[in-house]
Amino acid sequence: MQVKAPRGTYDIMPDDIYKWHQMEQIIRRTAATFGYAEIRTPIFEHTELFERGVGDTTDIVSKEMYTFQDRSNRSLTLRPENTASCVRAFIEHSVAGGVLPVKWYYMGPMFRYDRPQAGRYRQFHQFGVEAFGSNNPAMDAEVITLVLEILANLGLHEYELHLNSVGCPQCREVYRQKLIEHIRPVKDKLCTDCQSRFEKNPLRVLDCKVASCQEAIVGFPNMYDYLCPECSEHYNRVRNILTEAGISYMHDNQLVRGLDYYTNTAFEIMIPLIGAQSSVAGGGRYNGLVKECGGPDMPGVGFAMGMERLLLAMNNLENNMNDPKQIDVFLALLDEKYETQAMNLLSGLRRAGIRADRDYNQRSTKAQMKYADKMGARLVILLGEDEIQRGVVTIRDMQTRQQSEVANETLIAAIKAILE
Ligand code: ATP
Ligand code: MG
């Protein structure tokens, strides 16, 4: 029996990797222009970190984690997201004692036992940022601006920005009680998930995807009306900064993150044209999270974006990315007895930073030309007896179909001039 890749995973084949390289490069550059530095944390962590840092009433922790016992019977989990690990690293390295705010980004694979479909995998990739150490609404706005800048740099201009505030633990508690009172009479009409979680986490009912739950709760109270003066001021500042910057958004009172350590700003970005899984990024403020994970009282704000979904959106654009091809120069060997000369020539090209390759399978001259074309070579160098004796090579330009003779000494300069 042939073994296949596990359900919900996939290979990124060499033919497609350029798309990832280009997307990653644009994202890294944009993050760097905003002053974010990369952090790389382990792919697996102690299970407890996610139970605390993501919360055990979330779908992620309650149904989606890849958890296993290692050989010493420790419970470990493949990271389903990266915020908890960043918080752990922030605490573990006593980063709070240094200069604040600290601005980090990450990029890499995450693992969730999700139901695989277009835009939803069990191993997928996220790019995200965390900014620790400032409660300034301008920082919330910066983080949102960074997402939008990345989208723009990727050529993605059609999106919706949803924005809400979930307040602080004090004002949210008042709201929570109101919401529970509103939901309790219609409890029986809710899905089983919502029935079991609404007392503990009533905000989750607001973003339940089941249509009958939404019908049941119409007329629910709005968090915005319950924000305390400070939270209301914070939210208005974020909105004003975005408005002044010409960024349009929708206030969405059903955008919630139901855990106590999430505070104030919550946002989500959708690209409707990619279909059912249209959410490309989600984020917000988490002023209680660092403390919850055993660190100091430390504000934070961040987001995570799904890279497969970005690519899905980019695939809808024309001419957005170009395949850089495999090589620039192909060395056609016309006679096997010049193997040594060929190898020297090839080494020289490669050392000069030119992507060069040759035939290893004794192809005929004609077949070598075809092969060079397949690999995308712009130039072919023909190396035969006559050329070697005269200390020259013939260069064939596969684009213009023109051939010219170049002396060995000026070869690299000549090639670079053509490639530029
Ligand atoms: P969804 O409602 O689509 O499951 P989520 O609320 O679980 O999203 P977050 O935890 O906020 O998503 O993760 C941020 C982003 O990561 C999402 O907006 C999405 O683009 C991406 N993402 C989440 N889960 C997956 C997955 N299983 N496969 C691919 N991308 C994903
Ligand atoms: Mg999910």
Image (spheres, rainbow, N blue to C red):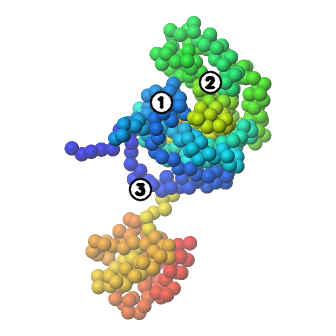
Left or right: where 154 falls relative to 98 = left
Disc 3: CA contacts within 10 A as few (<14), some (14-19) or many (>=20): few
Image marks 2 and 1: residues in contact by CB distance under 8 Å: no
Left or right: where 351 falls relative to 261 = left
SS for dot 3: loop
Q: Amino acid at mark 3?
A: Asp
Residue 336, position as x, y percentages in the image: 29, 82
- Whether residue 64 is visible, yes or no, is yes
Which residue lies under the disc numbered 3? Answer: 15
Q: Amino acid at mark 2?
A: Gln
**Mark number, residue 320:** none
Q: Earlier in the sequence, mark 2 or mark 1?
A: 1
At horizontal 56% and vertical 72% (from top left) the residue drawn is 420
Q: Earlier in the sequence, mark 1 or mark 3?
A: 3
At horizontal 50% and vertical 76% (from top left) the residue drawn is 352
Which residue lies under the disc numbered 1? Answer: 61
The residue closer to the viewer here, 7 or 81, is: 81
Q: Earlier in the sequence, mark 3 or mark 2?
A: 3
- Whether residue 30 is visible, yes or no, is no
In the image, residue 117 sits, relative to residue 256, either above or below, namely below
Front tag of 3 and 2 = 2
Of all residues shown, which one is farthest toward the top? 185
Q: CA distance from mark 2 to mark 1?
A: 21 Å
Disc 1: CA contacts within 10 A as few (<14), some (14-19) or many (>=20): many
SS for dot 2: loop
Q: CA distance from mark 1 to mark 3?
A: 35 Å
Q: Amino acid at mark 1?
A: Val
Front tag of 1 and 3 = 1
Residue 68, position as x, y percentages in the image: 38, 36
Front tag of 2 and 1 = 1
Which residue lies under the disc numbered 2? Answer: 254
Disc 2: CA contacts within 10 A as few (<14), some (14-19) or many (>=20): some
